């Protein structure tokens, strides 16, 4: 008998901007690990011919953040193969409206469509019944997939091929092990659409902490699961054969991976073999307490680290069950990374119940003076579906934004006890302006030079994080290079603009954006040149670089919140005077 075909189209969707256009770039900046993981699982099924020896399985994968999705071509490809389906993978809450719009087009062509990712999994894990946006998908005949795919893709493909696709696949109660799991691997042609040619992999899943704003613990579980050092080496070597050696390790907290040491030792050994490995890790604020962790991370190729700083007010941290963050150790932790010449990148959340415009402004100024952070990014406290915060607000009937497109951590999605929606929005915009002043950019670059970190490595990141919100109107994590805005890729229900109006306006917008970027790049490069030209630059010192003592006589961060630390963390009550003494 002749062979037959089965075509799979994988799409990692983007989301919409304020005008309803897809946020898309010629080169995006953050790789999609979900896309890599699902592609790897399906490629394994194709190699094993799980639909029978006479069925060739073909896979096309697209990250919409850097690729225009040609729906008509995808439909034609599946029909030409004779069978297949479309999967919207790794769909986060803010990407769900776009995923549904794409799915709607494929369902109009009568093709099977599956949507999976954190939004579907989070809603099904925490809510008593599917919310309206999930029910809308079910009403269109779209299948919802919750949980992880390891060991389950073959059964899904067989259901689709046999015409018995179920409305919901819920595997949240059965989390697979990670040992010897399929490699998350994308072809080079897809990876190179990410700036810097970064791939990604997860060395573990799950998190032991209880942060109430987090969805990880309710989707991937609080019991961490881990890949072995052999698995990670296999991932790195497979990518290296494609000349890909830069990786974003997507573990929510790599420092809590029980295999961190053998993994880092193995990667360091690969570097000694000549592989030019570079890592971006995500860690918590207590990682410096683990003997050898930071040193081994640097030896393995970690040159940038993302730290969940979140806030400097212990009351705010305790209120979200993030009690593991000890603000009196922040400076010591950051200095430990600087000693290994690793760029520090921290997240900071705005909108905790005790926050006010004045307190946020004060806290940012304290951070600038006290903490040697290179890159600071801001988020609005958001009740993401799948988090305890969202579940509690939903149960209480508290008003939340019904537009899932706004759940991108930069929009205000619920009320605040001390700030109106407009004030909160203004605070968010002003936070970026307050941190990324020219004076502080110069300070960051001077600290880098004095610490032995190349300022040229820092200045590009400073430029992007300073300008993304102000110039492009997007959070830096959604940023890319050269914005695409396709006239016909507009949100369902919004009218397409007249070409005679759209294209001239788009040309003007692009020119103005380019001009603003050129001005910002020139200004920051001039500041860097001045820093590098300073003959005394290596001797630069300020309070953030001074040894951390934890005492308020030298640490304004501790002094500002000394009265809150004991009550929050159950530490012995120590008056400020006693600490000073």
Image (spheres, rainbow, N blue to C red):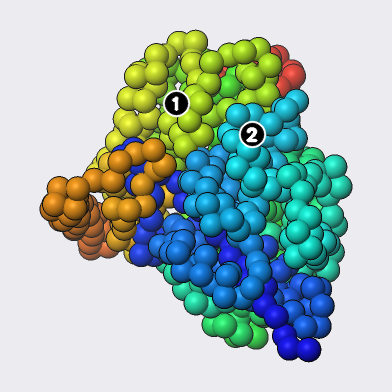
Look at the picture and state if 450 lies above or below 475.
below
- In which image quadrant can residue 113 be found? bottom right
Q: What element carries label 2?
A: helix
| Total numbered circles | 2
Q: What residue did someone put label 2 on?
A: 135
Tell me which residue sits at (64%, 73%) in the image: 82
> Position of 143 compared to 298: left or right?
right
Tell me which residue sits at (59%, 36%) in the image: 136
Mark 1 vs mark 2: in front: 2
The first of marks 1 and 2 along the sequence is 2
Q: What element carries label 1?
A: loop
Look at the picture and state if 536 lies above or below 144.
below
Closer to the camera, 323 or 223?
223
Percent of width and height locating residue 96: 54, 42
> Position of 383 compared to 450: left or right?
right
- Please rate how many residues cluster around mark 2, counting C-alpha atoms within 10 Å: few if below 14, some from 14 to 19, many from 20: some
Instruction: Say which mark, if any, is on residue 573.
Output: none
Closer to the camera, 105 or 375?
105
- In which image quadrant can residue 161 be found? bottom right
- Please rate how many residues cluster around mark 1, counting C-alpha atoms within 10 Å: few if below 14, some from 14 to 19, many from 20: many
Q: Quadrant of the C terminus?
A: top right
Percent of width and height locating residue 411: 43, 31
Tell me which residue sits at (77%, 83%) in the image: 54
Q: What residue did someone put label 1 on?
A: 412
Percent of width and height locating residue 367: 44, 34
Distance, label 1 to label 2, CA atoms, is 24 Å
Q: Quadrant of the N terminus?
A: bottom right
């Amino acid at each position: 008998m002749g062979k037959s075909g089965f075509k799979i189209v994988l799409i990692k969707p983007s989301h919409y901007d304020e005008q309803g256009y897809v946020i898309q770039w010629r080169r995006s900046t953050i790789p999609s690990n979900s896309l890599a993981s699902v592609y790897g699982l399906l490629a394994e099924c194709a190699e094993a011919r799980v639909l029978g020896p006479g069925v060739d399985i073909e896979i096309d994968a697209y990250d919409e953040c850097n690729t225009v999705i040609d729906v008509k071509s995808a439909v034609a490809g599946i029909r030409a193969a004779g069978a297949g389906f479309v999967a919207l993978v790794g769909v986060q809450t803010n990407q769900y409206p776009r995923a549904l719009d794409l799915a709607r087009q494929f369902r109009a062509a009568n093709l099977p469509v599956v949507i999976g990712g954190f939004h579907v999994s989070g809603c099904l894990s925490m809510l008593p019944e599917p919310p309206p946006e999930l029910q809308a998908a079910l009403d269109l005949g779209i299948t919802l997939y919750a949980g992880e795919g390891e060991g389950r893709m073959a059964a899904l493909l067989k259901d689709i091929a046999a015409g018995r696709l179920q409305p919901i696949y819920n595997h949240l109660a059965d989390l697979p092990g990670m040992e010897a799991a399929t490699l998350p691997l994308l072809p080079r042609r897809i990876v190179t659409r990410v700036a810097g040619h970064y791939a990604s992999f997860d060395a573990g899943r799950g998190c032991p902490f209880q942060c109430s704003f987090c969805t990880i613990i309710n989707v991937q579980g609080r019991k961490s699961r881990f890949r072995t050092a052999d698995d990670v080496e296999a991932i790195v070597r497979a990518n290296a054969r494609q000349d890909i050696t830069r990786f974003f390790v997507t573990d929510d907290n790599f420092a809590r991976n029980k295999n961190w040491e053998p993994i880092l030792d193995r990667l360091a050994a690969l570097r000694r073999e000549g592989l030019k490995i570079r890592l971006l890790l995500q860690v918590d604020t207590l990682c410096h307490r683990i003997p050898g962790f930071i040193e081994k991370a640097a030896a393995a190729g970690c040159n940038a680290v993302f730290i969940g700083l979140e806030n400097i007010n212990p009351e705010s941290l305790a209120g979200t069950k993030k009690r593991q963050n000890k603000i009196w150790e922040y400076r010591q932790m950051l200095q430990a990374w600087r000693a290994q010449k690793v760029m520090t990148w921290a997240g900071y959340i705005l909108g905790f119940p005790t926050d006010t415009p004045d307190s946020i402004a004060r806290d940012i100024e304290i951070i600038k003076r006290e903490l040697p952070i290179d890159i600071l990014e801001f988020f609005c406290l958001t009740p993401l579906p799948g988090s305890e915060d969202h579940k509690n607000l939903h149960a209480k009937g508290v008003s939340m934004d019904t537009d899932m497109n706004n759940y991108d951590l930069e929009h205000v999605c619920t009320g605040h006890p001390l700030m109106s929606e407009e004030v909160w929005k203004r605070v968010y915009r002003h936070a970026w302006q307050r941190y990324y002043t020219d004076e502080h950019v110069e300070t960051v670059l001077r600290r880098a030079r004095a610490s032995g970190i190349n300022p040229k490595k820092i200045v590009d990141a400073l430029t992007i994080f300073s300008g993304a919100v102000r110039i492009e109107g997007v959070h830096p994590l959604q940023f890319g290079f050269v914005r695409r805005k396709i006239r016909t890729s507009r949100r369902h229900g919004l009218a397409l603009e007249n070409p005679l109006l759209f294209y001239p306006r788009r040309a003007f917008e692009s020119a103005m954006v380019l001009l603003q970027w050129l001005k910002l790049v020139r200004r920051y490069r001039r500041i860097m040149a001045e820093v590098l030209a300073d003959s005394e630059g290596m001797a630069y010192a300020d309070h953030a670089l001074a040894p951390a003592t934890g005492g308020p006589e030298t640490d304004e961060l501790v002094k500002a919140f000394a009265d809150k630390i004991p009550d929050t963390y159950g530490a012995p009550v120590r008056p400020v005077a006693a600490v000073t003494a």
